[in-house]
């Protein structure tokens, strides 16, 4: 391993094609990225995954195509509030239409109190629905219904899926029994 920087608490090194950030103490190492925030966005940073157009040479951004990135930024719900740290973590993926920013879609995003999605379809057998998550084998569906309920279906027969779990029903039943979640 080639050590790039080192001090009494940690080190940064290159080991083949791996960047290593290591801690010498019982405190996990951190990589901090930062930028200012305004009404258009900002704060946080991005970890980008790209395809290099040429092998065996150093490729700058013009010789790469972005295929996806994980982004931490200030939540849209508090944009324009520079001191507000409410955050969103989003997964952005290239839809295959090219290498420009317009080719990126945000299928999934997380905030402290919600999960959002812009375009998630059905995987496995069947058509498409922006409100359904499907297990890799196509048997189990988590359907986010129009009324906001989350229902798990056994779709061994996709033409006649059977509801096997209703989160709203469970929470309502627990509340009727005196148990309220979240507390």
Image (cartoon, rainbow, N blue to C red):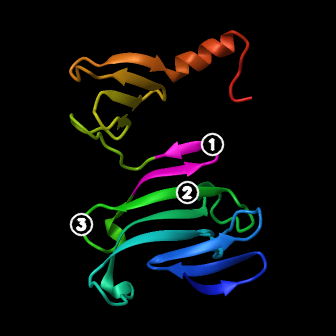
Label 2 vs 3, first from the N-terminus: 2
63 vs 148: above or below: below
Point 34% across, 35% down: residue: 134
Tag 2 secondary structure? strand
Residue highlighted by disc 2 = 89
Q: Secondary structure at mark 1?
A: loop
Side of 16 relative to 113 (left or right): left
In terms of depth relative to the viewer, which is nearer, 81 or 172?
A: 172
In the picture, measured across the screen, residue 95 lies left or right of residue 87, that is left
Q: Is residue 32 visible?
A: no
Rendered-image quadrant of the N terminus: bottom right
Badge 1 is on which residue? 113
**Is residue 62 covered in magenta?**
no
Q: Position of residue 175 (x, y in %)?
A: 67, 15
Q: Tell me, for residue 97, which label it has, or none.
A: 3
Q: How far across and how far down the image is residue 11, in percent?
A: 67, 78
Provide the residue span drawn in magenta. 106-116
Of residue 148 and residue 178, the one placed in the foreground of this image is 178
Q: Quadrant of residue 76?
A: bottom right
The CA distance from mark 2 to mark 1 is 12 Å
Residue 168 seen anywhere in this rendered image of the structure:
yes
Please check the rendered image and state whether residue 107 is part of the magenta-colored stretch, yes or no.
yes
């Amino acid at each position: 391993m080639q050590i790039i920087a080192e001090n009494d608490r940690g080190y940064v090194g290159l080991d083949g094609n791996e960047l290593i950030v290591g801690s010498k103490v019982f405190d996990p190492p951190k990589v901090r990225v930062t930028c200012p925030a305004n009404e258009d966005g900002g704060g946080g940073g991005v970890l980008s995954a790209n395809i290099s157009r040429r092998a065996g040479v150093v490729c700058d951004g013009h010789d790469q195509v972005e295929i996806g990135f994980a982004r931490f930024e200030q939540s849209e719900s508090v944009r324009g509030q520079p001191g507000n740290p409410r955050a969103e973590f989003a997964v952005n993926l290239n839809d295959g239409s090219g290498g420009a920013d317009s080719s990126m879609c945000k299928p999934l995003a997380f905030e402290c109190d919600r999960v959002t999605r812009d375009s998630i379809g059905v995987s496995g057998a069947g058509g498409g629905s922006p409100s359904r998550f499907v297990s890799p084998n196509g048997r189990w569906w988590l359907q986010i219904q129009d009324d906001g309920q989350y229902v798990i279906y056994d779709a061994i027969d996709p033409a006649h899926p059977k509801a096997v779990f209703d989160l709203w029903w469970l929470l309502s039943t627990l509340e009727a029994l005196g148990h309220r979640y979240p507390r």
